[in-house]
Image (spheres, rainbow, N blue to C red):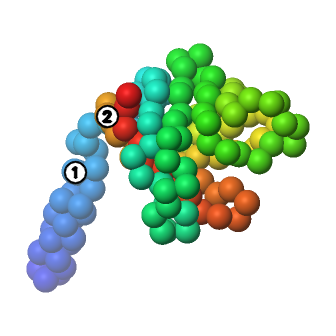
């Protein structure tokens, strides 16, 4: 009986040690909760990658996001109806770190990095993987 008491005490102490820090942690807002505010504005391409290889064919590309969740870009996206304009304009929505372009062209961009001056977007267009490194204008 004497032997079981120290063992029970050790197990009980270990349990408190393992579970107590989880109860004391503070709740922080997820990083992506700031994205709608941070993304607003015009972003210009610094470097583009197609299938993990740098490409210059997209030089001059920009993205512009409004607080009203409307975006425009001169990225050559496949559209079913040609509008005659080099600009692509659409509404978008956020789902955590994902931008979903609404409308005829079903595009999705994953935000890999976003701060006040730098934005990295990843997407797949026509079975090609793209990454856009952008800076705020």
Find the distance from the CA under tag 2 to the CA under tag 1.
36 Å
Identify the residue at the far right of this view.
81
- Residue at label 2? 117
- Residue at label 1? 21
Image quadrant holding the N terminus, namely bottom left
Above-or-below relation of 117 to 48? above
Image quadrant holding the C terminus, namely top left
Identify the residue at the far top of this view.
68
In the displayed structure, does residue 36 sit left or right of residue 9?
Answer: right
Which residue lies at the image location 59% right of the left edge and 53% below the top edge? Answer: 123
Single out the mark in the foreground, 2 or 1: 2
Q: For the residue carrying disc 2, how many other residues have a C-alpha within 10 Å: few (<14), some (14-19), or many (20+)?
A: few
Nearer to us in this view, 2 or 43: 43
> In this rendering, does residue 32 appear at all?
no
Which residue lies at the image location 18% right of the left edge and 59% below the top edge? Answer: 17
Q: Position of residue 6 (x, y in %)?
A: 12, 75
In the displayed structure, does residue 5 sit left or right of residue 38?
Answer: left
Above-or-below relation of 86 to 49? above
Above-or-below relation of 1 to 55? below
Q: Position of residue 122 (x, y in %)?
A: 53, 53
In the displayed structure, does residue 33 sit left or right of residue 74?
Answer: left
């Amino acid at each position: 009986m004497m032997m079981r008491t120290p063992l029970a005490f050790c197990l009980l102490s270990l349990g408190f040690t393992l579970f107590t820090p989880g109860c004391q942690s503070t709740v922080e807002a997820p990083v992506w909760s700031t994205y709608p505010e941070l993304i607003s504005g015009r972003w210009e391409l610094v470097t583009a990658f197609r299938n993990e290889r740098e490409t210059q064919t997209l030089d001059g590309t920009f993205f512009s996001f409004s607080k009203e969740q409307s975006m425009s870009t001169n990225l050559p996206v496949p559209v079913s109806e040609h509008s005659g304009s080099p600009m692509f304009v659409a509404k978008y929505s956020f789902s955590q770190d994902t931008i979903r372009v609404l409308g005829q062209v079903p595009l999705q961009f994953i935000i890999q990095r976003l701060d006040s001056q730098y934005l990295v977007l990843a997407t797949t267009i026509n079975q090609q993987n793209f990454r856009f490194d952008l800076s705020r204008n």
